[in-house]
Every structure is written in structure tokens, then in C-alpha cells.
Amino acid sequence: MPTSRRMRVLIAIDGSAAARTAIDVAMKLPWPDSVRVHGVVALRAGYAALRSRELDAALDASLRHAADSARALLGSRWDGAEVTILDEAPLDAILGEARRTRADVIALGWRGHGRFQRLLAGSVSRAVAANADCSVLVARTAPASVTRFVIGYDGGPNSRRAVSLLSRLEPGRGNRAVLVKVVEPVDKLPARAARLPRGVRATLRQELAALNARRCEAAQAELDTAAGRLKTSGWSTETEIRTGYPLPVLLSATRAHRADVLVVGAREAGGVKRALLGSVAEGALNSSRLPVLLVRS
């Protein structure tokens, strides 16, 4: 991720509680002073079959009021913050404006639906997370402060980009980044090994233990390198190796470290259009009560 260009953040605004949460979280992140913050409002909010001319006018007025309110709020922190109103559907407006402004991060809320809030999310939020060309900050709730970050670090390209993204921020006193590497241990012999002599099975177990130890050593080396980069950017850092399945382990780590934000990488899609986020990223968006920063190139 280039460091010579100032960061650009796009916030999706529609006047809803979810959008206000996204603004709240975005305003608490330790962006660099040079960051450019922009908002976008889409006037075509859907439900066309149910709308009348009067309802259209009311929705239009409501969204324009939301734009004015957001412009004033964002301007209280960032001089020159602007909000663009587009006569487009939300997904097209958000993705198009992100490309136009060359956004590094899109911030938006994550809507639930009644009692199924933790299982379902607004289709626009999900579609933006799946199809954006940049990183996406998804906020379901807003913590009182945003100072503690847990990074799910698997050593892949997008976890390295997550470190690059955070290294471009300007953490203040108390900002902490915990890099967590989840190692799925190889701790069981295949069923057919039961037919082998006891001594052979014991040797295989020793080899598995040695393999797991080497994997943990390699994981620690990766974490130390990533933590060193964050330290040079002013972060207080901690590294941690955990074993188990990545998603539940990462969610447990956010609770243990009282994190404010969970940072994960999206799946690398190659030449295929981004339709899948990867099981960990998808699971984090569905299950985490914390804001999730989904990082991709």
C-alpha cells in the first residue's frame, strides 16, 4: 500500500442508526492528520414498488438532511470534509464514489433485522464488503473509544496489508495492536495408524510434536516482523500464538484483550471477481459485535 499518498476514507451515510454508528467509529480511529474524509449519500434507497411521489419527496428530504448533519459533524474534526449526494442506488453510489475518490477505506454500518440481528445483515453492507476494491470498516456497534486493535495475522498478503494500513495511522498514547496468529495443530494420527506397532506410533507422535513446534516458531518469527513494523509507527504491540480454529479463537482473543476493533484480511480472489470474503472474514462480519476492519488491496 503506497505511503506517499495521503489516506482517503469514504463514509456511507443514510441517516440510519447504523450509519451514525459508522460515523462515530470512523471519527474515533487514529487517522493521520492529513487524511481526507468524504461522505456519500444515495437517494435511491429502494422499495420503489411501495413508494409514492409524496414518499419520494419525504425520503429525499430526509437523506439531504442526513447529508447536512453528517457534513457538519465530519467538519468538526476534519476541515474540508465533504458529503456527496448521488441519485443512484446505494451499492452503486458507494462503490463508484470509492473508486472516484480512490478511497483506502470505506466505513459503513451493519444493519440487523429484528431478532435475527446477528445472523442477517443489510444487503448493501454485505455487498459492499464483498465487492469493494479497498478495505472496508463495518460497524455494528460503537465502542466508547477506539484504541485497542486485535489483528488476525495469518501471514498472507492481506494480513500483511493490514499491518501496512495500520502503520499509516497515527496512534496516540494507549493505542495498542495485538497480533494473533492461530495455528491449527496437527495432533492426531490417522485412523489407519492404529494398526502400526506401538513404537512406530510413539515415533510418529514425536514427529507431530516437533512439526507443531516448528510451525509455532515460524509463526512467532512472522509475528515479530509484523510487530516490529507497527512499533516503528508508534504502536504499542503484543504478539500471541493460539491454537484451534481461526474464527472462534480470534473472537475469543478480542474478548480477552478487550479489543475495540477486529482486523482481518479478505480472501485473495486472484482473477475472479470478489464474491467470497473467506470463512474467517465472513464469520467475523456475521458474529463479531466489534467493528470489523476487513483489509484487502
Image (spheres, rainbow, N blue to C red):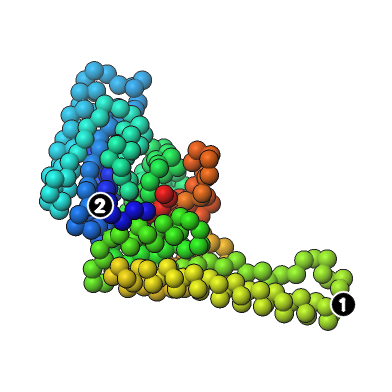
> Disc 1 designates what residue?
197
Vertical order, 291 against 214 (above or below): above
> Disc 2 designates what residue?
6
Rendered image: mark on residue 236: none
Q: Where is residue 13, by image quadrant? A: top left
Q: Nearer the viewer, residue 3 or 120?
A: 3
SS type, badge 2: loop
Q: Where is residue 211, by image quadrant? A: bottom right
Residue type at tag 1: Pro
Residue type at tag 2: Arg
Vertical order, 245 against 14 (above or below): below
Cβ–Cβ below 8 Å for labels 1 and 2? Answer: no
Identify the residue shown where x is 35% and y is 50%.
Answer: 137
Q: Position of residue 39 (x, y in %)?
A: 23, 41
Identify the residue shown where x is 25% and y is 60%.
Answer: 30
Q: Position of residue 82 (x, y in %)?
A: 17, 41
The label nearer to you, 1 versus 2, is: 2
SS type, badge 1: loop
Vertical order, 23 against 251 (above or below): above
